[in-house]
Image (cartoon, helix red, strand yellow):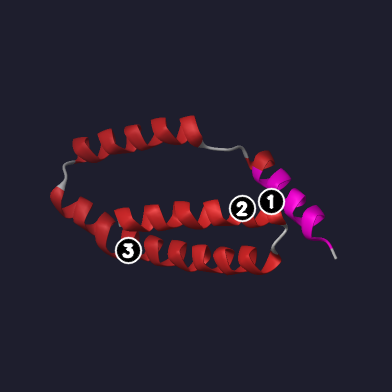
Amino acid sequence: MHEDHKHARAHVSAMIQALERKDKTTLSEHMQAYGLLLSEHIRKEDDILYPWMDRMLSTTQVGKLYERFNDVREKVSYSPSEYEQFIQNLETTFKQ
Protein backbone atom coordinates (compact mmCIF):
# COMPACT_ATOMS: atom_id res chain seq x y z
CA MET A 1 0.00 0.00 0.00
CA HIS A 2 2.97 2.28 0.54
CA GLU A 3 3.71 1.92 -3.18
CA ASP A 4 0.17 3.16 -3.92
CA HIS A 5 1.05 6.43 -2.22
CA LYS A 6 4.22 6.80 -4.28
CA HIS A 7 2.28 6.12 -7.49
CA ALA A 8 -0.45 8.55 -6.43
CA ARG A 9 2.08 11.33 -5.86
CA ALA A 10 3.60 10.62 -9.29
CA HIS A 11 0.17 10.92 -10.93
CA VAL A 12 -0.54 14.19 -9.13
CA SER A 13 2.84 15.56 -10.19
CA ALA A 14 2.17 14.54 -13.79
CA MET A 15 -1.28 16.16 -13.63
CA ILE A 16 0.20 19.44 -12.40
CA GLN A 17 2.76 19.40 -15.20
CA ALA A 18 0.04 18.63 -17.75
CA LEU A 19 -2.04 21.50 -16.40
CA GLU A 20 0.88 23.87 -16.77
CA ARG A 21 1.33 22.74 -20.40
CA LYS A 22 -2.46 22.67 -20.98
CA ASP A 23 -1.99 19.09 -22.19
CA LYS A 24 -5.50 17.66 -22.04
CA THR A 25 -4.53 14.17 -23.17
CA THR A 26 -1.86 13.63 -20.53
CA LEU A 27 -4.02 15.23 -17.85
CA SER A 28 -6.91 12.92 -18.71
CA GLU A 29 -4.69 9.83 -18.72
CA HIS A 30 -3.25 10.59 -15.29
CA MET A 31 -6.60 11.61 -13.83
CA GLN A 32 -8.10 8.30 -14.93
CA ALA A 33 -5.13 6.31 -13.65
CA TYR A 34 -5.24 8.20 -10.36
CA GLY A 35 -8.95 7.49 -9.99
CA LEU A 36 -8.41 3.78 -10.58
CA LEU A 37 -5.51 3.72 -8.14
CA LEU A 38 -7.60 5.44 -5.46
CA SER A 39 -10.50 3.04 -5.96
CA GLU A 40 -8.21 0.04 -5.58
CA HIS A 41 -6.38 1.57 -2.63
CA ILE A 42 -9.63 2.27 -0.79
CA ARG A 43 -10.75 -1.30 -1.48
CA LYS A 44 -7.51 -2.61 0.07
CA GLU A 45 -8.06 -0.42 3.12
CA ASP A 46 -11.65 -1.55 3.52
CA ASP A 47 -11.06 -5.24 2.82
CA ILE A 48 -7.61 -5.82 4.29
CA LEU A 49 -6.18 -3.03 6.44
CA TYR A 50 -9.18 -2.05 8.57
CA PRO A 51 -10.27 -5.63 9.32
CA TRP A 52 -6.66 -6.44 10.28
CA MET A 53 -6.58 -3.41 12.58
CA ASP A 54 -9.85 -4.52 14.20
CA ARG A 55 -8.38 -7.97 14.87
CA MET A 56 -4.86 -7.01 15.92
CA LEU A 57 -4.96 -3.61 17.63
CA SER A 58 -6.49 -2.60 20.92
CA THR A 59 -9.07 0.16 21.15
CA THR A 60 -6.39 2.38 22.72
CA GLN A 61 -3.98 1.74 19.85
CA VAL A 62 -6.65 2.50 17.26
CA GLY A 63 -7.53 5.70 19.13
CA LYS A 64 -3.90 6.82 19.09
CA LEU A 65 -3.65 6.15 15.36
CA TYR A 66 -6.86 8.07 14.77
CA GLU A 67 -5.48 11.04 16.71
CA ARG A 68 -2.23 11.00 14.72
CA PHE A 69 -4.12 10.77 11.41
CA ASN A 70 -6.25 13.75 12.43
CA ASP A 71 -3.15 15.75 13.37
CA VAL A 72 -1.64 15.13 9.95
CA ARG A 73 -4.95 15.81 8.18
CA GLU A 74 -5.20 19.21 9.89
CA LYS A 75 -1.70 20.12 8.74
CA VAL A 76 -2.11 19.13 5.08
CA SER A 77 -5.82 19.31 4.29
CA TYR A 78 -7.44 21.82 2.04
CA SER A 79 -10.80 23.38 2.73
CA PRO A 80 -13.78 22.52 0.50
CA SER A 81 -13.61 26.00 -1.01
CA GLU A 82 -10.02 25.35 -2.11
CA TYR A 83 -11.12 22.16 -3.90
CA GLU A 84 -13.98 24.06 -5.54
CA GLN A 85 -11.57 26.77 -6.68
CA PHE A 86 -9.22 24.13 -8.09
CA ILE A 87 -12.07 22.60 -10.14
CA GLN A 88 -13.19 26.04 -11.34
CA ASN A 89 -9.63 26.76 -12.46
CA LEU A 90 -9.55 23.47 -14.37
CA GLU A 91 -12.84 24.29 -16.06
CA THR A 92 -11.61 27.75 -17.02
CA THR A 93 -8.27 26.48 -18.28
CA PHE A 94 -9.74 23.71 -20.42
CA LYS A 95 -12.98 25.35 -21.52
CA GLN A 96 -13.50 24.83 -25.20
The residue indicated by pointer 1 is 20
Q: Depth check: give the residue in front, 60 or 76.
A: 76
Amino acid residing under circle 1 = Glu
The residue indicated by pointer 3 is 44
- Single out the residue that lies furthest toward the left: 56
N-terminal-most mark, 2 or 3: 2
Q: Decide: marks 2, 3 in contact (CB < 8 A)? A: no
Disc 1/disc 3 C-alpha distance (Å): 32 Å
As helix, strand or loop, the secondary structure at mark 3 comes to helix
Viewed as shown, does residue 20 lie left or right of 76?
right
Which quadrant would residue 38 be assigned to in this image?
bottom left
Residue 56 at x, y = what percent? 14, 50
> Which quarter of the rendering shows the N terminus?
bottom left
Q: Magenta stretch?
A: 83-95
- 62 up-or-down from 11: above or below: above
Task: Specify the label residue 83 is tagged with.
Answer: none
Task: Specify the label residue 17 is tagged with.
Answer: 2
Q: Decide: marks 1, 2 in contact (CB < 8 A)? A: yes
Q: Which residue is drawn at 36% across and 37% down?
A: 69
Residue 51 falls within the magenta-colored stretch: no
